[in-house]
Image (cartoon, helix red, strand yellow):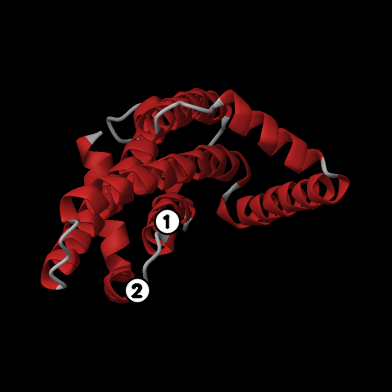
Amino acid sequence: MKGMLIKDTRLLLQQRRFIVLVIVGTIVWACTQENGFAIGWLMSMCAIWAGGTISYDEFDNGFPFLMTLPAERKTYVLGKYVFGVLLMAGSLLVYEAVLAGALLAKGAPDLSAKLPEELLGDVGGFSVCLLFLAIMIPIQIKFGVERGRVILLFVFAATALVGQVALRSGLAEELAQGIRQALTGVPGGVLVVIALAAALSLLLLSALISISIMNRKEF
């Protein structure tokens, strides 16, 4: 797997100018705005970058060559998940360090109280991005990157449509109220841990599905 991770890192570095621009923009965004959307967006980009390396592997009939290397198909698939998780976790750690530095520079007196609160919210966003990665990789391995993007677009469009229908019918409000009542009194940290555990479980299920798809592919 180490070789696969090195390969993907080198492929990703071919976009280093764009990546540096995204990181700098995210840092500026995080330091000037009082919200957590910046890190969520950056982690989403990391997931997309990880999935995008599959397009490089497909290019110029690259899969038959990769499968001749001393690496199993299972290793290839797991490498994509590990690479995506490492990118997102790394971006989260860097963001939290930048946030702490920005708060110290501003002379924030409540750093010890504000930073843990921000961290809990960002870990919750990390869980959502893990779910995005779990959906994206099996689709791209099954259908290829180009068709996979179209399918992902339809998946998210259908999800948005269902959400709109639920909102207009009042079902979403009833469901949200039921969830709030069920979780009343549960500490925020426990909720974040539950969300992270659920996301990791779905990521594991996604990896098993992707390995099954990859084992059935013919090159």
Tell me the residue at 41%/31% (across/down): 196
Q: Position of residue 150 (x, y in %)?
A: 68, 56
Please name whichever residue, 151 or 173, is drawn nearer the observer in this view of the structure: 173
Which residue matches tag 2?
A: 29
Please name whichever residue, 188 or 23, is drawn nearer the observer in this view of the structure: 188
Q: Is residue 67 visible?
A: no
Circles 1 and 2 in contact, beta carbons < 8 Å = no
Tell me the residue at 55%/37% (across/down): 138
Q: Which mark is residue 40?
A: 1
Mark 1: amino acid: Gly
**Residue 10 horizontal side relative to residue 214, left or right:** left
Q: Position of residue 148 (x, y in %)?
A: 62, 50
Tell me the residue at 34%/42% (across/down): 120
Tell me the SS state at disc 2. Answer: helix
Q: How many marks?
A: 2
In this view, 209 is above or below 65: above
Q: Which mark is residue 101?
A: none
Q: Position of residue 104 (x, y in %)?
A: 12, 65
**Which quadrant of the view contains residue 177?**
top right
**Which quadrant of the view contains residue 10?**
bottom left
**Which quadrant of the view contains residue 179?**
top right
